[in-house]
Image (tube, grey):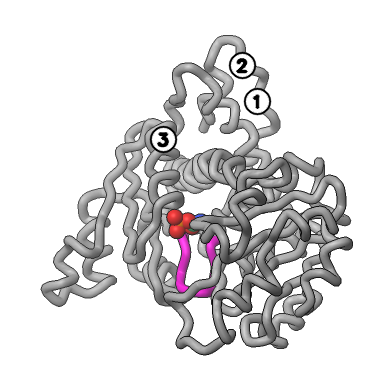
């Protein structure tokens, strides 16, 4: 199966094709993937980055495939990015919106997905507030499942786009020190970052108020810190995470003002960091809570680069899962 990237006149020749060795049916989390599989996705995403720079931003790689977006939780970036990624690969795409669906009439999550599968969905992109919901679905439908964020568990494509952004800016991941700042306890982005970064050889420091940074995180091979000012000079990258008020029971810090005093990324704090400090934030960002507007829009910020890279990462994931499907079908060994 071709990415279609190399068919455009003037395109550089495609690199070695990672689709030939891709064996995963689903993308459920970065915990499951090897370092080689993560690098294969990042390399594929690099070749798709080029498609988005063309005047005609479309390749035929997923022609005839059907991609459904099943979002049971709100999203701006992930949903639109998956939708656009599928369209750029020439797939047919359909959005399912939980709030206007027959879930309100008592239909279950699994029955909903089975009905969507019956319409020919090859790939379902699933976001749900319950950790493990995409994993459950993968056991009940034949479609490939992509986890677009499950509760506080994982958000693998966000982790991958963060890795891609760091790799583009710094050249490589191995040997870097990356700070994950803020609400670690409730953040699926933190978990996917930890798995991805540590597998690719980075040192990870998780930093925030003790109530938002569980000691149990040490088991994942990360350093725990509560004092941002003390760790900042050691960091090559800081990923500023959002306070997940919607997943908290409340009372985890005295006030937003106090949180910001100790943990908001300000220009003064940026000056304490390395001169080439890279700042990421998965979005949505809360200006004046987790980072100041000047920092969000400043020269160290790669927040919008992350969004651009997210499109390429999602094209890569859709492409690799679809290529595996095609290989299985061609070998007469379909799932
Ligand atoms: N970063 C991220 O997942 O954003 P959305 O919730 O808008 O998709």
Pointer 1: what residue?
A: 14
Q: Are marks 2 and 3 in contact (CB under 8 Å)?
A: no
Report the span colored magenta.
Answer: 147-155
Q: Is residue 324 above or below residue 11?
A: below
Choose between 48 and 290: the one closer to the eye. Answer: 290
Pointer 3: what residue?
A: 62
Query: Was residue 24 drawn as part of the magenta stretch in this picture?
Result: no
Choose between 131 and 214: the one closer to the eye. Answer: 214
| Circle number at residue 45 | none
Identify the residue shown where x is 44% and y is 39%.
85
Cα gap from disc 1 to disc 3, whole angstroms: 17 Å
Q: Whole-percent x and y of residue 111?
A: 22, 69
Nearer to us: label 2 or label 3: 2
Q: Is mark 3 within 8 Å of ligand 1?
A: no
Q: Whole-percent x and y of residue 177?
A: 83, 60
Cα gap from disc 2 to disc 3, whole angstroms: 19 Å
Pointer 2: what residue?
A: 11
- Residue sitting farthest toward the top: 9
């Amino acid at each position: 199966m071709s990415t279609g990237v190399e068919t455009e006149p003037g395109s550089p020749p495609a690199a070695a094709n990672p689709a030939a060795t891709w064996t995963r049916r689903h993308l459920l989390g970065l915990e499951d993937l090897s370092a080689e599989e993560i690098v294969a996705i990042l390399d594929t995403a690099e070749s798709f980055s080029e498609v988005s720079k063309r005047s005609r931003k479309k390749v035929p790689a997923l022609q005839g495939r059907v991609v459904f977006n099943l979002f049971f939780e709100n999203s701006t970036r992930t949903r639109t990015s998956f939708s656009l990624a599928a369209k750029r690969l020439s797939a047919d795409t359909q959005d399912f919106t939980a709030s206007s669906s027959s879930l309100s009439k008592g239909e279950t999550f699994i029955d909903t997905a089975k009905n969507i599968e019956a319409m020919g969905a090859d790939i379902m992109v699933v976001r749900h507030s319950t950790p493990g919901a995409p994993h459950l679905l993968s056991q009940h439908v034949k479609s490939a499942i992509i986890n677009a964020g499950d509760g506080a568990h994982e958000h693998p494509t966000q982790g991958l786009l963060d890795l891609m952004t760091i790799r583009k800016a710094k050249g490589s991941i191995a040997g870097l020190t990356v700070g994950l700042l803020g609400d670690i306890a409730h953040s699926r982005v933190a978990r996917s970052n930890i798995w991805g970064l540590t597998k690719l050889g980075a040192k990870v420091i998780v930093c925030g108020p003790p109530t938002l940074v569980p000691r149990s995180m040490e088991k994942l091979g990360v350093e725990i810190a509560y004092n941002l000012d003390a760790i900042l000079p050691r960091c090559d990258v800081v990923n500023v995470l959002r306070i997940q008020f919607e997943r908290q029971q409340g009372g985890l810090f005295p006030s937003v003002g106090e949180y910001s005093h100790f943990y908001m990324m300000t220009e003064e704090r940026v000056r304490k960091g390395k001169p080439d400090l890279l700042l990421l934030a998965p979005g949505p960002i809360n200006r004046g809570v987790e980072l100041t507007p000047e920092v969000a829009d400043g020269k160290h910020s790669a927040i919008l680069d992350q969004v651009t890279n997210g499109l390429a990462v999602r094209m890569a994931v859709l492409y690799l899962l679809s290529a595996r499907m095609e290989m299985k079908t061609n070998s007469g060994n379909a799932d």
